[in-house]
Amino acid sequence: MEVGVLFNKRQQTFARFVPSGRHPVNPFSEQFSHTIPTASGSANGRCQAAQTHGGISLDVEWSVNFDLDPFQIKASARPKLARNLPKKANSIVTKHLNNCLRHVIGEMTIDQVCEPGATRRLERAVRQQLTSRLADAGFSISRVMIGAIEMPRHVRAALEAAQERAVQTENEARALARLHQVVSQFSEAEMQRLMELERIHTLGQNGVTLVYPTAVNQTPAAGRPSFTKLKRNNSHAVQPVS
Protein backbone atom coordinates (compact mmCIF):
# COMPACT_ATOMS: atom_id res chain seq x y z
CA MET A 1 0.00 0.00 0.00
CA GLU A 2 2.92 2.32 -0.72
CA VAL A 3 4.68 3.87 -3.68
CA GLY A 4 8.42 4.51 -3.56
CA VAL A 5 10.02 7.81 -4.56
CA LEU A 6 13.39 7.90 -6.30
CA PHE A 7 15.47 11.05 -6.63
CA ASN A 8 18.36 11.93 -8.90
CA LYS A 9 21.43 11.41 -6.75
CA ARG A 10 23.52 14.20 -8.19
CA GLN A 11 20.90 16.89 -8.72
CA GLN A 12 18.66 15.89 -5.78
CA THR A 13 15.59 16.24 -7.97
CA PHE A 14 12.62 13.93 -8.45
CA ALA A 15 13.34 11.00 -10.73
CA ARG A 16 10.38 8.59 -10.68
CA PHE A 17 7.77 6.67 -8.70
CA VAL A 18 8.06 2.91 -8.27
CA PRO A 19 5.25 0.60 -7.08
CA SER A 20 5.62 -1.93 -4.29
CA GLY A 21 7.96 -4.80 -5.10
CA ARG A 22 11.51 -5.30 -6.39
CA HIS A 23 12.88 -2.82 -8.92
CA PRO A 24 16.30 -2.24 -10.48
CA VAL A 25 17.90 0.97 -9.21
CA ASN A 26 21.08 2.53 -10.51
CA PRO A 27 23.03 3.27 -7.31
CA PHE A 28 25.24 5.80 -9.11
CA SER A 29 22.42 8.03 -10.40
CA GLU A 30 19.37 7.22 -8.25
CA GLN A 31 18.63 7.01 -4.57
CA PHE A 32 15.56 5.87 -2.69
CA SER A 33 14.08 8.79 -0.76
CA HIS A 34 10.78 7.84 0.89
CA THR A 35 7.40 6.24 0.30
CA ILE A 36 3.91 7.63 -0.23
CA PRO A 37 1.06 5.67 1.39
CA THR A 38 -1.72 4.76 -1.01
CA ALA A 39 -4.19 3.30 1.50
CA SER A 40 -7.52 5.08 1.85
CA GLY A 41 -7.20 8.25 3.89
CA SER A 42 -9.52 10.65 5.61
CA ALA A 43 -9.54 14.19 6.90
CA ASN A 44 -11.94 16.32 8.87
CA GLY A 45 -12.12 19.93 9.84
CA ARG A 46 -14.17 23.05 10.28
CA CYS A 47 -14.56 25.74 7.64
CA GLN A 48 -14.97 29.05 9.46
CA ALA A 49 -16.66 32.23 8.26
CA ALA A 50 -17.91 30.84 4.95
CA GLN A 51 -20.20 33.59 3.66
CA THR A 52 -23.48 32.94 1.91
CA HIS A 53 -24.83 34.99 -0.97
CA GLY A 54 -26.01 37.88 1.16
CA GLY A 55 -23.09 38.01 3.58
CA ILE A 56 -24.18 35.62 6.37
CA SER A 57 -21.13 33.94 7.92
CA LEU A 58 -21.38 30.21 8.62
CA ASP A 59 -19.10 27.75 10.39
CA VAL A 60 -19.34 24.32 8.75
CA GLU A 61 -17.99 21.00 10.01
CA TRP A 62 -16.95 18.47 7.37
CA SER A 63 -15.17 15.18 6.78
CA VAL A 64 -13.80 13.56 3.63
CA ASN A 65 -12.55 10.13 2.52
CA PHE A 66 -10.06 9.80 -0.31
CA ASP A 67 -7.64 7.50 -2.10
CA LEU A 68 -4.23 8.48 -3.44
CA ASP A 69 -2.50 7.17 -6.57
CA PRO A 70 0.82 8.94 -7.26
CA PHE A 71 0.91 7.51 -10.78
CA GLN A 72 -2.12 9.65 -11.64
CA ILE A 73 -0.32 12.86 -10.72
CA LYS A 74 0.19 15.25 -13.59
CA ALA A 75 3.81 15.10 -14.78
CA SER A 76 4.49 18.78 -14.16
CA ALA A 77 3.24 18.47 -10.56
CA ARG A 78 5.20 15.34 -9.62
CA PRO A 79 8.45 16.99 -8.42
CA LYS A 80 6.62 19.16 -5.86
CA LEU A 81 4.05 16.58 -4.76
CA ALA A 82 6.67 13.85 -4.44
CA ARG A 83 8.09 15.83 -1.52
CA ASN A 84 4.79 17.02 -0.01
CA LEU A 85 2.50 14.00 -0.20
CA PRO A 86 4.19 11.79 2.41
CA LYS A 87 3.41 14.23 5.23
CA LYS A 88 0.98 16.77 3.79
CA ALA A 89 -1.71 14.76 1.98
CA ASN A 90 -4.34 15.64 4.59
CA SER A 91 -3.30 19.29 4.58
CA ILE A 92 -3.68 19.46 0.80
CA VAL A 93 -7.16 17.94 0.93
CA THR A 94 -8.18 20.22 3.81
CA LYS A 95 -7.04 23.38 2.04
CA HIS A 96 -8.87 22.57 -1.19
CA LEU A 97 -12.04 21.34 0.54
CA ASN A 98 -12.34 24.59 2.52
CA ASN A 99 -11.93 26.57 -0.68
CA CYS A 100 -14.57 24.49 -2.46
CA LEU A 101 -16.96 24.80 0.47
CA ARG A 102 -16.61 28.58 0.57
CA HIS A 103 -17.20 28.77 -3.17
CA VAL A 104 -20.34 26.61 -3.08
CA ILE A 105 -21.83 28.35 -0.04
CA GLY A 106 -21.05 31.73 -1.60
CA GLU A 107 -23.52 30.93 -4.37
CA MET A 108 -26.32 30.01 -1.94
CA THR A 109 -28.63 32.21 0.12
CA ILE A 110 -29.20 31.46 3.79
CA ASP A 111 -32.71 30.22 2.92
CA GLN A 112 -31.25 27.75 0.41
CA VAL A 113 -28.75 26.49 3.00
CA CYS A 114 -31.66 25.76 5.39
CA GLU A 115 -33.95 24.08 2.85
CA PRO A 116 -34.77 20.36 3.26
CA GLY A 117 -32.15 18.30 1.44
CA ALA A 118 -29.70 21.22 1.29
CA THR A 119 -26.97 19.26 3.09
CA ARG A 120 -27.03 16.47 0.49
CA ARG A 121 -26.87 18.99 -2.35
CA LEU A 122 -24.02 20.79 -0.63
CA GLU A 123 -22.08 17.53 -0.23
CA ARG A 124 -22.53 16.63 -3.91
CA ALA A 125 -21.46 20.08 -5.11
CA VAL A 126 -18.36 20.15 -2.88
CA ARG A 127 -17.38 16.62 -3.88
CA GLN A 128 -17.64 17.45 -7.58
CA GLN A 129 -15.48 20.55 -7.23
CA LEU A 130 -12.95 18.81 -4.98
CA THR A 131 -12.65 15.86 -7.37
CA SER A 132 -12.01 18.24 -10.25
CA ARG A 133 -9.40 20.20 -8.34
CA LEU A 134 -7.41 17.22 -7.02
CA ALA A 135 -7.61 14.85 -9.99
CA ASP A 136 -4.23 16.02 -11.34
CA ALA A 137 -2.73 15.57 -7.86
CA GLY A 138 -3.57 11.86 -7.79
CA PHE A 139 -6.48 12.10 -5.35
CA SER A 140 -9.75 10.26 -5.78
CA ILE A 141 -12.52 11.59 -3.53
CA SER A 142 -14.84 8.84 -2.37
CA ARG A 143 -17.01 10.73 0.10
CA VAL A 144 -17.70 14.20 1.48
CA MET A 145 -19.88 14.66 4.55
CA ILE A 146 -21.20 17.95 5.91
CA GLY A 147 -21.79 18.10 9.66
CA ALA A 148 -23.12 20.88 11.85
CA ILE A 149 -23.71 24.27 10.27
CA GLU A 150 -23.57 27.11 12.76
CA MET A 151 -24.87 30.61 12.10
CA PRO A 152 -25.24 33.84 14.12
CA ARG A 153 -27.89 33.64 16.84
CA HIS A 154 -29.98 36.50 15.48
CA VAL A 155 -30.09 34.86 12.04
CA ARG A 156 -31.20 31.52 13.51
CA ALA A 157 -33.86 33.28 15.60
CA ALA A 158 -35.19 35.08 12.51
CA LEU A 159 -35.31 31.84 10.52
CA GLU A 160 -37.14 30.03 13.31
CA ALA A 161 -39.69 32.86 13.54
CA ALA A 162 -40.23 32.76 9.78
CA GLN A 163 -40.70 28.99 9.91
CA GLU A 164 -43.26 29.37 12.70
CA ARG A 165 -45.19 31.94 10.65
CA ALA A 166 -45.11 29.66 7.63
CA VAL A 167 -46.52 26.75 9.65
CA GLN A 168 -49.26 28.98 11.07
CA THR A 169 -50.18 30.24 7.61
CA GLU A 170 -50.31 26.69 6.29
CA ASN A 171 -52.61 25.62 9.13
CA GLU A 172 -54.91 28.59 8.51
CA ALA A 173 -55.03 27.79 4.81
CA ARG A 174 -56.05 24.19 5.55
CA ALA A 175 -58.73 25.41 7.97
CA LEU A 176 -60.13 27.82 5.37
CA ALA A 177 -60.15 25.05 2.79
CA ARG A 178 -62.16 22.81 5.12
CA LEU A 179 -64.56 25.68 5.88
CA HIS A 180 -65.04 26.36 2.20
CA GLN A 181 -65.77 22.68 1.61
CA VAL A 182 -68.46 22.71 4.32
CA VAL A 183 -70.02 26.01 3.22
CA SER A 184 -70.18 24.85 -0.39
CA GLN A 185 -72.66 22.19 0.70
CA PHE A 186 -75.16 24.74 2.10
CA SER A 187 -78.40 25.51 0.25
CA GLU A 188 -79.10 28.99 -1.10
CA ALA A 189 -81.59 29.69 1.72
CA GLU A 190 -79.02 28.65 4.33
CA MET A 191 -76.44 30.89 2.72
CA GLN A 192 -78.86 33.84 2.87
CA ARG A 193 -79.44 33.26 6.57
CA LEU A 194 -75.69 33.02 7.20
CA MET A 195 -75.11 36.28 5.33
CA GLU A 196 -77.84 38.00 7.37
CA LEU A 197 -76.32 36.73 10.63
CA GLU A 198 -72.93 37.99 9.54
CA ARG A 199 -74.40 41.40 8.70
CA ILE A 200 -76.08 41.65 12.11
CA HIS A 201 -72.89 40.53 13.84
CA THR A 202 -70.86 43.17 12.01
CA LEU A 203 -73.35 45.93 12.85
CA GLY A 204 -73.34 44.89 16.49
CA GLN A 205 -69.55 45.04 16.62
CA ASN A 206 -69.71 48.58 15.24
CA GLY A 207 -72.13 49.68 17.99
CA VAL A 208 -75.17 50.07 15.71
CA THR A 209 -78.64 49.91 17.32
CA LEU A 210 -81.03 47.71 15.35
CA VAL A 211 -84.81 48.31 15.34
CA TYR A 212 -87.23 45.77 13.86
CA PRO A 213 -90.93 44.82 14.26
CA THR A 214 -91.44 42.52 17.24
CA ALA A 215 -92.99 39.13 16.82
CA VAL A 216 -94.50 39.28 20.35
CA ASN A 217 -98.14 40.37 20.64
CA GLN A 218 -98.18 43.70 22.43
CA THR A 219 -100.73 46.49 22.57
CA PRO A 220 -99.55 49.16 20.13
CA ALA A 221 -99.94 52.80 21.03
CA ALA A 222 -102.49 54.80 18.99
CA GLY A 223 -102.43 52.61 15.92
CA ARG A 224 -98.65 52.54 15.57
CA PRO A 225 -96.78 49.25 15.14
CA SER A 226 -94.77 47.93 18.06
CA PHE A 227 -90.95 47.76 17.69
CA THR A 228 -88.13 46.22 19.67
CA LYS A 229 -84.76 47.93 19.73
CA LEU A 230 -81.52 45.97 19.82
CA LYS A 231 -78.41 47.71 20.95
CA ARG A 232 -74.86 46.63 21.85
CA ASN A 233 -73.91 46.32 25.51
CA ASN A 234 -70.45 46.23 27.05
CA SER A 235 -70.04 42.50 26.39
CA HIS A 236 -70.40 43.07 22.62
CA ALA A 237 -73.68 41.11 22.47
CA VAL A 238 -76.88 42.53 20.96
CA GLN A 239 -79.64 42.72 23.62
CA PRO A 240 -83.32 43.71 23.35
CA VAL A 241 -84.31 46.95 25.06
CA SER A 242 -87.95 47.55 26.00
Image (cartoon, grey):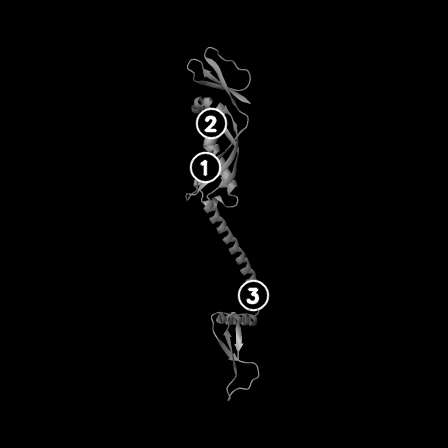
| Res. 138 visible in picture | no
Residue 157 percent coordinates (x, y): 48, 48
Q: Picture quarter containing residue 95?
A: top left
Q: Find numbered disc 3 in the image and state the secondary structure of the residue it sits on.
A: helix
Please identify, in this view, whether the residue under mark 1 or under mark 2 is nearer the observer: 1
Quick one: label 1, few (<14), some, or many (20+) residues within 10 Å? some
Counting the numbered discs, the total is 3
The amino acid type found where label 1 is placed reads Gln
How far is the residue under mark 3 from the one under mark 1? 55 Å
Please tell me whether residue 19 is drawn above or below residue 122 in the rendered image. Answer: above
Q: Secondary structure at mark 1?
A: strand
Q: From the viewer's side, name the closer residue of 183 and 228.
A: 228
Label for residue 48? 1
Disc 2 residue type? Ala
Image quarter (top left, top right, bottom left or bottom right) of the N terminus: top right
Q: Residue at x 56, y 71 (%)?
A: 190
Q: Earlier in the sequence, mark 3 or mark 1?
A: 1
Viewer can see residue 240: yes
Report, in whole angstroms, how far the alpha carbon at label 1 lies from the one at label 2: 25 Å
Mark 3: give few (<14), some (14-19) or many (20+) Cα within 10 Å.
few
Point out the tag, 1 or 2, that comes first from the N-terminus: 1
Residue visible at 47% across and 19% down in the picture: 16
Instruction: Tell me the element at label 2.
Output: helix
Residue placed furthest toward the top: 28
Q: Residues within 10 Å of mark 2 (few under 14, many from 20)?
A: many
Q: What residue is pinned by disc 2?
A: 137
Amino acid, disc 3: Val
Reading the image, the residue beneath label 3 is: 183
Query: Sequence order check: which comes first, mark 2 or mark 3?
Result: 2
